[in-house]
């Protein structure tokens, strides 16, 4: 049996918000359906395993970034996260380090960490 039908990059469910017909209504319905597919995919991605450092839990990508910064500053990941959380920044409201839902949303490195690590510590 040969399957010569069109191949879609985004698999659409057989039912849902899609409308049959033509015109703006169908276009809008497809946009909403595609947006919901993307959001559902992100919800699944947000439930991935977290790695705890101190009081914070990090997504895998953010944990890997902490490891790069820790290596560049010659500190342990625990020590670096603790220092970033303790230092208050005069340029950023609410502190220098903000983690939401496992993702680093805000970080400002204190000068003493940057000076000790050298000029190229954040270019890995």
Image (cartoon, helix red, strand yellow):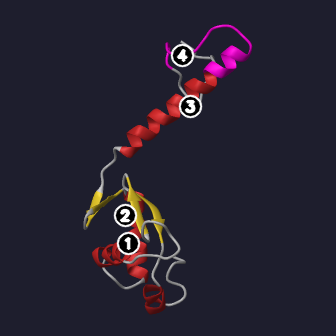
- N-terminal of the pair, mark 2 or mark 3, is 3
User: How many angstroms separate mark 4 from mark 3 (CA)?
Assistant: 11 Å
- Tell me whether the residue at label 2 lies in contact with that at label 1, contact meaning CB atoms closer than 8 angstroms: yes
Camera-side residue: 40 or 94? 94
Residue drawn at (42%, 74%) of the image: 68
Camera-side residue: 96 or 2? 96
Residue that numbered label 3 is attached to = 35
Q: Is residue 12 left or right of residue 72?
A: right
- N-terminal of the pair, mark 2 or mark 4, is 4
Tell me where residue 21 appears, x and y as whole percent.
68, 7
Camera-side residue: 54 or 40? 54
Q: Which residues are magenta?
A: 13-29
Residue drawn at (44%, 71%) of the image: 96
Q: Is residue 97 left or right of residue 36?
A: left
Q: From the viewer's perspective, is the residue at label 2 or at label 3 nearer? A: 3
Q: From the viewer's perspective, is the residue at label 1 or at label 4 nearer? A: 4
- Tell me whether the residue at label 1 lies in contact with that at label 3, contact meaning CB atoms closer than 8 angstroms: no
Tell me where residue 64 appears, x and y as whole percent.
40, 65
Residue that numbered label 1 is attached to = 67
Q: From the viewer's perspective, is the residue at label 1 or at label 3 nearer? A: 3
> Crowding near pointer 1: few (<14 within 10 Å), some, many (20+)?
some
Say above or below: 24 vs 65.
above
Residue that numbered label 2 is attached to = 63
Residue 60: quarter of image: bottom left
Say above or below: 65 vs 10.
below
Residue that numbered label 4 is attached to = 17
């Amino acid at each position: 049996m040969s399957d010569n039908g069109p191949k879609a990059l985004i698999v659409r469910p057989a039912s849902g918000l899609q409308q049959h017909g033509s015109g703006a209504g169908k276009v809008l319905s497809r946009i909403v359906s595609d947006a919901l597919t993307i959001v559902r995919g992100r919800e699944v991605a947000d439930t991935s395993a977290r790695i705890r450092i101190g009081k914070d839990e990090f997504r895998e990508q953010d944990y890997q970034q902490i490891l790069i910064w820790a290596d560049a500053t010659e500190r342990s990941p625990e020590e670096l996260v603790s220092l970033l959380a303790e230092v208050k920044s005069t340029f950023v409201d609410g502190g220098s380090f903000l983690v939401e839902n496992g993702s680093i949303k805000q970080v400002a490195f204190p000068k003493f960490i940057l000076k000790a690590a050298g000029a190229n510590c954040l270019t890995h």
